[in-house]
Image (cartoon, rainbow, N blue to C red):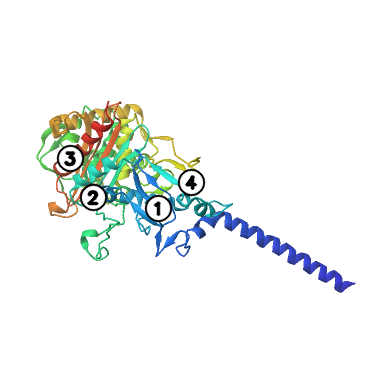
Amino acid sequence: MKMITKRGVFLWILCFLFVIGIVILVISFANNGSDWAMKRYNKHLYSNGELIGAGTIYDTDGVALVETKNGERVYNEDRTIRKATLHMVGDKRNFISTGVQSVYDYRLTGYSLMFGVYNLKRYGKGNDLNLTIDSEICAEAYNALDGRKGTVGVVNYKTGDIICCVSYPSFDVNNPPDDIDTNDEYEGVYINRLLTAHYVPGSTFKIVTAVCAIENIPDIFERTWDCGGAYQPDEGVEITCNADHGHKINFKDALAKSCNSAFAQIAIELGEEKLNKTARELGIGSSIKISGDISCYSGKLELNGKIAEDKLGWTGIGQGDTRIAPISMLAIVSAIANGGKAPAMNAVKGLASQAGERLNISIPSSTTQLMDAETASKMKSMLRYNIKEQYGDSNYEGLNLCAKSGTAQIDQYDEHNIAWFTGFMDDDSCPYAFVVAIENGNSGSKTAGPVANRVMQAVKEKYGK
């Protein structure tokens, strides 16, 4: 009798462990099923390591950027569009991790927890994904870069919809170069430079310092500073300026003329704690997610309360150890344009099933208050002043542009600079912000500025009223 009892208890334990195992398996399947289905050995979805079983990806105008035909992925017939949209769409082998073809791979295949990829076989295609990007504007940006490494981004600063996301170097997915992994020309080719590049911000960071000054120095617009072509802080090395701006340069002119002497003094007066606080509030160091799913570089600002005055001064003018992805700068100028509110960035318009039915997909619609409306209004006025008094309205005819250039020095040679130009059109009928960053670009206004003008003129022509 005791033996039977022991066996019964043992069987109950086995049954209990079996049930626990089933529960663990079901939970694992629910959490990881899509990842298991997307393994490259799944011949329903991959051939020779290339994704084949996926739906069509469209741009905002319904132009097919890539689709599956006869068991293979076929990209747009226009070579420039293929190269211009590569980093947003993704390559055939999903080496571009931020491409939607990689991020939304299981959605594009039509995978479901209940039926797996059965519907792919049933309908002969996967789910279709509609994007916010405009392939025409992307092609214009790609041509404007003219073979220079860098990026161009354009976003609607009211809705957060990204209409342009171009990164160079790129390549033609229909004819990949044999030396793509060894030729310096293709260095970083799988990186989306808009989303994940680690760039020194240069004088575009003076926007951050200016916001901090407006919020913390009550008489900032009544103050003046001396510039003799350089500024010597009490501690450390001399901070050189791009010109001798003379005595009594005011705040607006200091930003317009990008006076290092004035902004180094402002940064030192503000101190690390305040400058660091403003930078964090503006999103530097916080990861941006495109459409809630595509991760971007979070940025780096190293102010730990122990740095010397000269280093704080260099940080305030954008030449310290700070690193920013262009998408972060795009978010900041979007907030300035939009009354201090930065809309959630988005690249996805919708998802449709194999049967053409609209499917639920998370599209962010929230906004984040990066600065108060009064600060944003003052910054908008200053950025507009930059164009009228420094860069020239005639160079950006009809755009009503507000912007700031930057020339981030990497070393002593000018050709190794990062040329920046970022801003927005102050136009409710055409509410678009932009960022341009060009590696080895020399001057921000002279190199990146014309690229921005060409792209934004195309945006104005197509979307302006």
Mark 1 lies on a secondary structure that is strand
Residue position marked by numbered label 2 in the rendering: 150
Q: In which quarter of the image is residue 280?
A: top left
Cα–Cα span, label 1 and label 4: 12 Å
Residue position marked by numbered label 1 in the rendering: 68
* 201 on left or right of 395: right
Identify the residue at image location x=65%, y=58%.
Answer: 23
Category of crowding for the residue at label 3, using alpha-carbon neighbours closer than 10 angstroms: few (below 14), some (14–19), many (at least 20):
many
Tell me which amino acid carries mark 3. Gly
Could you say where residue 69 lies in the image, as x and y percent from the top left?
Answer: 39, 53
Could you say where residue 250 lies in the image, as x and y percent from the top left?
Answer: 17, 31
Residue position marked by numbered label 4 in the rendering: 354
Identify the residue at image location x=20%, y=43%.
Answer: 406
Earlier sequence position, callout 1 versus callout 2 = 1
Mark 2 lies on a secondary structure that is strand
Question: Pointers 1 and 4 in contact (CB under 8 A)?
Answer: no
Question: Pointers 4 and 2 in contact (CB under 8 A)?
Answer: no
Could you say where residue 190 lies in the image, as x and y percent from the top left?
Answer: 31, 57
Cα–Cα span, label 4 and label 2: 37 Å
Identify the residue at image location x=22%, y=64%.
Answer: 183
Residue position marked by numbered label 3 in the rendering: 449
Quarter holding the C terminus?
A: top left
Mark 3 lies on a secondary structure that is helix
